[in-house]
Image (spheres, rainbow, N blue to C red):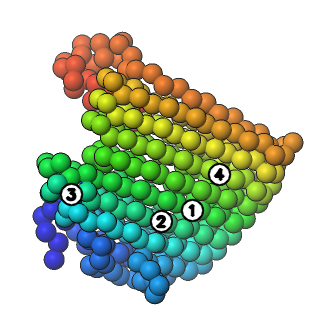
């Protein structure tokens, strides 16, 4: 049975109000507590280490997989290895995410290592949300590592979101694209207090006519610190666009270091980076519509991170 706290955390990180329909795996405090496979999607535990294999049969359409993780105790260190094999011609949605409710003084931490194989002509949309909460001083730490291989004519869209409440995070994303493969990564990040966040992304465009878009949108408040290292490496005839936009507030610090590297004469690579504060005219406009300054500020930030 799921407690009220469990349901709250699942709704926050995976938009689930209860046990989902279809294929799913729910992990709580280092253990799998509920799992279901379907005729076209098999979820099975790994034999040699913590984690699961998600095997999506070729041609699978209009199905989804939910694999949320929740930690609701202090002093936990959870490490999980998940492998996703998206079969040829499949088209699926995968909803992940991790929420930590730390009720104590000790650090709770979750490290997730996700390997994706997107087979020829397959399409996948992957949504991952990270969130932390707790009234005590125990830290909430999340360190995701994502490794993606997109085969010929494959398409992967990855939405990587840190909502709030995560004290420290190191995010590492690696991708390799083959002939005519496409990858879109959108990362959204919010930090406040004394939180720190580091994100590193490297996309290698190996095959002809491969394309990628890397989009980072972040807000840093209070005394928090963020640093981003997105990189696109063109090894063939390809196209890449790297875009980093950030809003900085209070005494926060942000560094954005995008990189494009061309190792082929027909690689077309572009990068943009911008860091700034909320425009005064935006605040004034919303305040003339009846919002207090704090409400106007929150409205702008939510729109920016949407």
Q: How many marks?
A: 4
Q: Which of the two discs, 2 and 4, labels the residue nearer the N terminus?
A: 2
Q: What residue does disc 4 label?
A: 203
Graded by Cα atoms within 10 Å as few (under 14), some (14 to 19) or many (20 or more), the crowding at tag 1 reads: some
Residue at 55% in and 80% down: 57
Marks 2 and 1, how far apart in space?
8 Å
Residue 39 at x, y percent in the picture = 46, 85
Residue 67 position within the rendered picture, expressed as x and y whole percent measured from the top left: 37, 69
Camera-side mark, 3 or 1:
3
Quote the CA–CA distance across marks 2 and 4: 17 Å
Neighbor class of circle 2 (other Cα within 10 Å; few <14, some 14-19, many 20+) is some
Side of 167 where 41 appears, left or right: right
| Mark 2 touches mark 4? (CB < 8 Å) | no
Measured in 3D between alpha carbons, the distance from the residue under mark 4 to the one under mark 1, in whole angstroms, is: 10 Å
Q: Secondary structure at mark 3?
A: loop
Q: Earlier in the sequence, mark 3 or mark 2?
A: 3
Q: Quadrant of the C terminus?
A: top left
Task: From the top left corner, tell me how far across and down residue 220 is, in percent.
Answer: 37, 32
Which residue is outermost to the front? 106
Q: Give the quadrant of the N terminus.
A: bottom left
Q: Which residue is mark 2?
A: 113
Residue at the disc numbered 3? 106
Mark 4 vs mark 1: which is more N-terminal? 1
Residue mark closest to the camera, 2 vs 4: 2
Q: Which residue is mark 1?
A: 147
């Amino acid at each position: 049975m799921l407690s009220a706290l469990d349901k709250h955390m699942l709704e926050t990180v995976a938009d689930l109000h209860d046990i989902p329909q279809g294929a799913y795996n729910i992990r709580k405090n280092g253990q799998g507590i509920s799992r279901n496979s379907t005729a076209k999607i098999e979820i099975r535990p790994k034999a040699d280490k913590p984690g699961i294999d998600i095997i999506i049969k070729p041609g699978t359409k209009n199905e989804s997989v939910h694999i949320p993780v929740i930690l609701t105790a202090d002093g936990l260190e959870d490490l999980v290895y998940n492998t996703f094999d998206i079969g040829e011609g499949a088209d699926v949605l995968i909803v992940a995410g991790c929420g930590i409710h730390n009720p104590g003084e000790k650090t709770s931490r979750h490290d997730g290592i996700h390997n994706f194989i997107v087979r020829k002509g397959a399409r996948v949309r992957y949504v991952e949300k990270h969130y932390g909460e707790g009234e005590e001083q125990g830290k909430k730490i999340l360190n995701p590592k994502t490794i993606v291989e997109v085969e010929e004519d494959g398409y992967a869209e990855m939405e990587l979101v840190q909502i709030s409440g995560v004290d420290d995070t190191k995010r590492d994303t690696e991708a390799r694209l083959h002939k005519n493969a496409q990858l879109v990564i959108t990362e959204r990040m919010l930090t406040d207090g004394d939180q720190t966040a580091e994100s590193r992304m490297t996309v290698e465009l190996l095959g002809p006519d491969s394309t990628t878009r890397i989009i980072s949108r972040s807000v840093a408040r209070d005394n928090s610190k963020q640093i981003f290292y997105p990189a696109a490496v063109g090894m063939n005839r390809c196209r890449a666009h790297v875009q980093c936009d950030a809003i900085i507030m209070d005494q926060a610090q942000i560094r954005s270091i995008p990189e494009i590297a061309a190792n082929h004469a027909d690689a077309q690579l572009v990068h943009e980076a911008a860091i700034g504060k909320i425009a005064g005219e935006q605040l004034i406009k919303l305040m003339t519509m009846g919002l207090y300054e704090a409400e106007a500020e929150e409205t702008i930030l939510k729109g920016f991170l949407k």
